[in-house]
Amino acid sequence: MRALGERVSPQGDRGFKSRPLRNVRNRKAISTLLGRLNSFYEFITSPPLLMFYYVYILQSQKNNSLYIGYTSDLRKRFKQHNNGESQATKPFRPYKLIFYEAFLSRIDAKNREIYLKGGYGRKTINGLIKKYLSGIRI
C-alpha cells in the first residue's frame, strides 16, 4: 500500500519509495553540492595558481656573447630567440640557455634582470657560472 502523498513512477512500483525533495535539509544539501561542483569546475578550468617568471641568460654559439632577459614562458621565449623572432638576438643565433632563475613575482624578475645587466650584475654572473664561463669575458 502507498502512503498518502507518495509518488509512484510512471513505470510502476519498482520496490522502493521515492520522496519529494521539498524539505529544507535536502535543498540545502543539493545547493551545497552544486556550489562545490561549481567551485571545482572553476578550479580545474582556471589558469595555474602559481605562475613563475624567469630571468635567463643565453649564450650565442656564434660569438659567445651573452643575452639577459625575463619571461613567463621560458621554453617559448627560447624558441623565439633561436627562430630569429627577436630583433636583438637575431644576428647572433643560435643560442643555448646557460642559466635561469624562477620568481613568483614579475616585478622581482624584472628587478633581477635589471640588476644582472648592470655592473655588479655582471660580476654576479661571473660568480654564478664561473666554471662554465672559463675563458669567456663579459
Image (cartoon, rainbow, N blue to C red):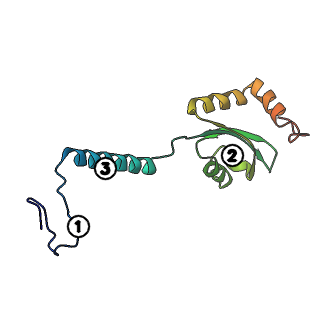
The answer, for residue 85, to whether it is visible in the render is no
Relative vertical location of residue 103 with respect to residue 118 in this rendering, above or below: below
Q: Could you tell which of marks 3 and 2 lies nearer the N-terminus?
A: 3
Q: Going from the N terminus, do you reach mark 3 or mark 1 first?
A: 1
- Closer to us: 110 or 118: 110
Residue type at mark 2 is Thr
The disc placed on residue 124 is none
Q: In the displayed structure, does residue 122 sit left or right of residue 82? A: right
- The residue lying furthest to the right in this view is 135
**Residue at the farthest top position:** 120
Q: Is residue 122 left or right of residue 29?
A: right
x%, y% of residue 82? 68, 53
Depth check: 52 or 10 in front?
Answer: 10
Q: Secondary structure at mark 1?
A: loop
Q: CA distance from mark 3 to mark 2?
A: 52 Å
Estimate the spatial distance between the alpha carbons at disc 3 and disc 1, rounded to whole Å: 26 Å
* Residue to which mark 3 is pinned: 34
**Does residue 114 lie above or below 78 as drawn?**
above
Question: Tag 3: residue type?
Answer: Leu
Residue at image x 12%, y 68%?
1
Residue occupying the point 89% across, 39% down: 131
- Residue depicted at 16% across the width and 70% down the height: 9
Q: Of helix, strand and loop, which one carries label 2?
A: loop
**Residue 100 appears in the picture as rendered:** yes
Question: The C terminus lies in which quarter of the figure?
Answer: top right
Q: Position of residue 38 (x, y in %)?
A: 35, 48
N-terminal label among 1 and 2: 1
Q: Which element carries disc 3, helix, strand or loop?
A: helix
User: Which residue is the site of mark 1?
Assistant: 16
Residue that numbered label 2 is attached to: 89
Extreme residue in the bottom direction: 11
Mark 1 belongs to which amino acid? Answer: Phe
